[in-house]
Structures are given as C-alpha cells and as structure tokens.
Image (cartoon, grey):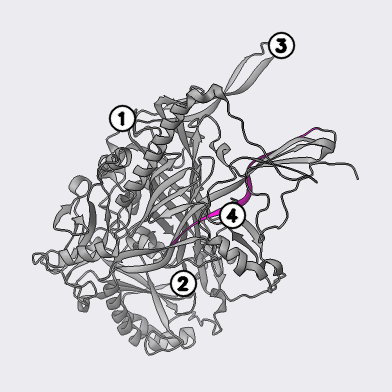
Amino acid sequence: MFGPRVTEVGHSCRESLDSVCMSANRTEPQSSSSSHFNLISEGSNRQSSRPSADMKVLWLLPLLFLASCDCIRGREWAHHGAPMFADLSVRELKAVRSYLHNLPELGLTNAQNPSLKKNSILLMELHLPRKHEALRALDRGQVRPSRQARVVVQFGNQTKPNITEYIVSPLPSPNSHQVKTFKGNKPIRFESRPITKVEYSHIDKILRKISTKIETLLKDLTGGFSYNNCTDRCLTFSDIAPRGLEPGERRSWIMLQKFVEGYFIHPIGFEILINHQNLDPEKWTVEKVWFNSVYFDSVEELVEKYEAGKLEDFPNLPDQDDIYSTYIPRGNSNTPTDIHGPKLVEPQGRRYHVDRNFVEYAGWSFSYRVRSSAGLQVFDLRFNGERIAYEISLQEAIAFYAGDTPAAMQTKYIDAGWAMGASSFELAPGVDCPEIATFVDLYHFFDTDKPVRHKNALCIFEMNTGMPLRRHFNSNFTGGYNFYGGLENNVLVLRTTSTVYNYDYIWDFHFYQNGVVEVKVSATGYIHATFFTPNGLNYGSKVFHYVLGNLHTHLIHFKVDLDIAGRENNFETIDLKYVNFTNPWSQKHFVVQSKLHRVEHKTERSAAFRFGKKFPRYTHFYNPSELNKWGHHKGYRIQLNSHGHSVLPRGWREEVGISWARYPLAVTRHKDSESSSSSIYTQNDPWEPTVSFEDYIRNNEDIVKQDLVAWVTVGFLHVPHSEDIPNTATPGNAVGFFLRPFNFFDEDPSLSSRSTVIVRPGANRAPVVQRWTPDTVGRCVTEGPFSYDGTYEEV
C-alpha cells in the first residue's frame, strides 16, 4: 500500500472525499500482497516478476527461520512490556486516592478545600520500575513488575508544614506505601511547592482589595478597565516566578493586564510584590509597588501621589479595540479562500499500528507516556526488534528573561514547576495534527480531586515530508539517462503539546525509515511582554503601544538512555585534524588534508561539554563488543540542532537549580536514583534544588563499557520583534536533536522499504518503471499511474 500523500483538495477531490478518502483513511492496514515488484512500460500491460527458487540458498532457511522466531519473540516481549510504561489509568488514579484518603494518619482532605492549612494530594503519576526489573520482562518475557504510583502530598496542617512523596503499590489495588526520597536524601521545602488553584483564589482576593483602593487610577490609566465589578472591560493578572530571592521565601511579583484575547501582551504598567508565605491569607502583605517606572513602598503611597497630582508623565493607554492580539485575519491576502489548502491522505489506509501505549511502524516499535510533571517520554525504542534506546524523555524546559520592570527582571520560568506535562490540551485536527491522525486522550491528576481527561491531547500519524529520503538521476550525458532511483520520505510522528500559560511547546518524535529518530520542540504562543520603558529597549523590542517584548532564552533538556546492541557501551567524539605529508606521486609537492581524530571519553567529567567551548562534530555511542559486517563497532550518534547557550554565570543564584543547562551534552552512567534532571520544586527553590544535575557527574565515574545515559540540552535565544504579534511562529523556532545510526547497520535499512521507484530506459527509450506498490496512488491524489520521461534536450 502507499504511504500518506499530500493532496490539494480541489473540486474533484472534494466531491469524492466522503465516498473515497474517508473510507480509505479508516481502512485497517492491508496485507502486503504486492511485495513482489511490478514492471510497467509505456503502451504495455503490467507484468509481474517473481524471483525463482535457488537451491543454493536452501541451507539458509533454518537460519532465517531462527531469526524470524527471534524477531517475533522480541516483538511479543516488547508488546508484553509496554504496560509497564503506560500512564496511570482513571481506575488506578481513583484507587490510589481512595487508599491514601482512608489512612487516618495522613489526615487528607480535598485539594479544592479553600484552606491552605490542609493536607492534600498535589500530584499523582506513574512511578517507573527499575530498569533491570523492566528488562526482565522486555528481554526475557518474564512477569512484569507491579505498577506503582508516585504521589506528592502537601502537609500544610501541621506545626512544620512539609512536602512528602510516596510510592503507592501495587496497582490497581494498592495496599502499601513508602516514602520516596531524592538523591542525597534532600528535603523538600514547603515553600518550593507549585502554586495551586486555591492559592490563586486567595491572590485574586487580595488583588480585589488592592484594586478597590486604586480603581480610579486604573480606570483613568486604561480607559475604563477595572479589576472589580466589571463586565467586558476587565483586568486580569500574571504571576512571576521564582517566588523570591532566596530559599524559604514565597513572594511573587504580579502584573496586571487587560483581560482580552491574548492578554499576555496587554500589560498596563502596574506591578505589585505580594508576600504570600503565610498559610493564613489574611496575613499576606504588599511589599512593593511598581508603576510607570517608579517604585513605591505601598499601595497607599501610590494613591496619595496620584490624588495629589504628583505622578509625572502619567500614561493614558490607547482606548481602542484590541484586535492586535487576536487571530482575526487582517491585511491583504492573495490566497483563494473558496478552496482548502493541501491535505494529508492515506490512500489505502494506515500503515502503523497502535495498541494502547504501544506503537509499531516500518520496523520501529516503542512505548510512550506523558507524565504530568514533565511531559512526553518514549521507552524501549527498537528498530527491527533491536533496542536502540531504553528511554528518551523530556526533562525540563526553561525560559529566562531580562527587562526593565521588576516582573521582567525576575522572570525565570522553569516549566516542570507548572506541571508542564499536565498542560497538554486538545489538538485541533487539520491544524495541530492532520485529520487522518490517531488522536489519544490523556488523563492527569494535578491539583485536582478527580482525574482530568484531556481529550485528543496526543496524536500519532504518518506523513510524507515532501522531500525524498534519497534519490539519484544518473545521466548518460547525451540527453538521456541510465536510470533514476528514488524513495519517498515517509515518517511516523508522535506529537503532543504543552501550553504553559503564554507559551505553547509542540513536542515531536519523528521516526524515519532509515533508522533515524528526530526529537524536536517547536515554540509558539504569546511572548511574555511587559510595560514599555525607554530603558526597556536594552532588553527587547517595542511591539505595540506601551508593550515591550522581552528577550529570553529557551533551553530544553532531554534524557537519552541508549542501549546500543546491549547495555555495555562506550562513548567517543570524532573531529578532524589536518595532516601534511609528501605527495607520494609528486615528491616535490605536499598533501594537506583532513584526518579523523577520535577521542575516547573514559569518565563522566570528560564527557560533560560546556556551553561556550568548542563542541565536537560527532558524538558517538557504540558497543565495543559488537561489529557490523565491515568490522566497525555498531553505534549511533547524537546530532544537535540547537542555538542554545548558558543563561547565567555558573553558580550564580538561580543557575544552581538548572546546572544541567551548563552542558549541551553530558554523559553519565545509568542509575535508577538519577532518573530525572529536574523536579517540580526547582521553579520556586532554584537556589537549593531538591534535584541537582551537577551531583550526577560530580563523582566522575568510569563510563567505559557501561550503561550510558546522554543528557542533551537544546535551545535558542529569542529577541521578540513585531512579527511575533500576535504569536511567535514555528518556522525558525524549532530545535532538537537526531539519533543517527553510525555503522549500526550493514547498509541503509530503508532498503527494505517497498516505496522505492526505479526507472530505466527500455526499447526505443520507453521508460520501464519498477516499483513494489500499487500502480496508482488513489483517486484523491492522482487517478493516473506513475509516469517518468527522463530525457532532456535543447529547445
């Protein structure tokens, strides 16, 4: 069958979409009945050609049978092990909550209880099994380890409030729990907890009290917008993190904005610092106010100077419709609006298979989950039954800002602290994913009392990139050709998103036919904007009246647990160096050329590459005991697509909490105790983080013939500009990395694809087309068979 095609949905195709396209898209994958190749020549009927039996290779059949059995068994074990990595089900989430709420010693109450002095569950998600336990099921077909839940509990109703994490098991019928500790038994400060809806409700109440005092000022400033007693001309707020300047604090800068579509880019120039550390909201205080580039010690001081007419250069924001922040089309367009643009179709149905969280496609198989804290993860990634990676997972995403207002200079977002994974919302068919995609619901339990269903929050689809995977036109240099060969580039895409307030991250895994995996994030959404000041131009660009788009750096961290032909791997870097020697065939001349320069890295510190230093061109992970047909060590390499750089000097305050951001690549030995590089607590306590990545490489362990983990950091600098209005666009704002085979195979594994097309000149130069898929693609793409001429001539 054919892979996906992009078709222009014109009148002829639109008329047959319901009867042809939609039925084809829903067809189950067909058996590959056309695995033999077909010969097509102009003006002749199609002929079939089948390879004849060759008695000389009969002795290979037992070996092929054994290999086939191993492949089938490996597939069965991979499928058998996939549930170990599946997110907690609704049944499991409810069972865990019920179990813990029935323990009188915990004294749990509902998360939505309006009191902050309460014990409640903040987060529940899957607790992964230890790797060696999981491998027994994946590699030997043994019984899977019991499923467990990680539960974060806020104990606020006690003399010394704290955060405690529990491991609850077995699922789905839990009957035991134990305290989960972090590396080094580091405690979790209560002030480092993520903010909740209940805490936001109390922030809203204090803002309403404050707004009552400055209502006249706000209305004069904004042309009638207010925080209280409003209908269509309302104000809202955004809060800034980290919440303080040192450990143990919980005080947040809050900035007011017009509550219109895209309110993120409607600051009004009023920012206020609220201390909300006390669990009694009545004891919260205002510590500082910033208005129109001036700091005040209290709201009363601001009101007094306003009423006395002592506020210089009082701004009056334009009273106009705020269409600039919306998606409403404007400007001239030359694109026809009476027809849709090209659409992706599957002419004969899907060519991939999804069974819950287990996916198979073109030799690939993997399991996936979307953990509520940090997002998308892929496990047990195999190609043709052979594991490439045990885990590839998103760890953290940060955006560190700069600016002239206190909110801007304080903004250092560390997104796991905002439950980046649970911020995965519904994907729009035809925009976020093709209409033909498989859409999957996700379930999260964060700051809630019941599991929350996020409908269609993940999608899986096969797409044609519009670029050949490989091709060659072999000219005969006399106006014709010897042959043409090409292979269409179809990839499987696994996608979800995280909308962390203003920003939208699109998370992609692309699986190519030639054994390559691309991991990519595309940034879009609204910029983080503050009130414009003249000095603000040192930190960004003016994008609208009184609006500054603040410069910031995005950094994304991934964990890549590679198992290349087994768990005992080595790591080397490959660069080039010049060599100079006498030309052997012309002794009076010299040859200067490049030579491979390999460096084997034997310790973790040696394999930690700093930003700002020269980065090696090839980073190569290989198995020293496994060779391919040509005598090379079987390996994979990591190729970065990134413009990232460090965001703060090493060791400077908040930088301690993101020590992983020092390294575009660091390699460590696998340890179950080093499962993540960040935590949900880092956002509000980056100064003394519960999880410190630097601890993973501080002991500088040996990494020769070890189970290795690559920690990859990618990112980019974003200086906002007028074209970021209303939203940052994805082109040019996508970064990531490739996993590319490097002598892992004996040849390009995409040779197994039957989507290849070969054309050779036949009699009278009539092209003879050789292909392994149906003659015609399908009515919604083209009704005619493949055709090719290949000649060129003067005109």
Q: Position of residue 268 (x, y in %)?
A: 46, 77
Q: Position of residue 135 (x, y in %)?
A: 30, 40
Up-down relation of residue 732 to residue 97 (above or below): above
Res. 4 mark: 4
Q: Please tell me which of labels 4 and 2 falls first in the chain.
A: 4
> In the rendered image, which quarter is residue 625 located in?
top left
Mark 1: few, some, or many residues within 10 Å (few <14, many ≥20)? some
Q: CA distance from mark 3 to mark 4?
A: 56 Å
Q: CA distance from mark 1 to mark 3?
A: 47 Å
Q: Is label 2 in a helix, a strand or a loop? A: helix
Q: Which residue is mark 3?
A: 586
The magenta-colored residue range is 458-476
Dot in front, 1 or 3: 1
Q: Please tell me which of labels 2 and 3 falls first in the chain.
A: 2
What residue do we see at 82% from left, 41% from top? 791
Q: Position of residue 367 (x, y in %)?
A: 38, 50
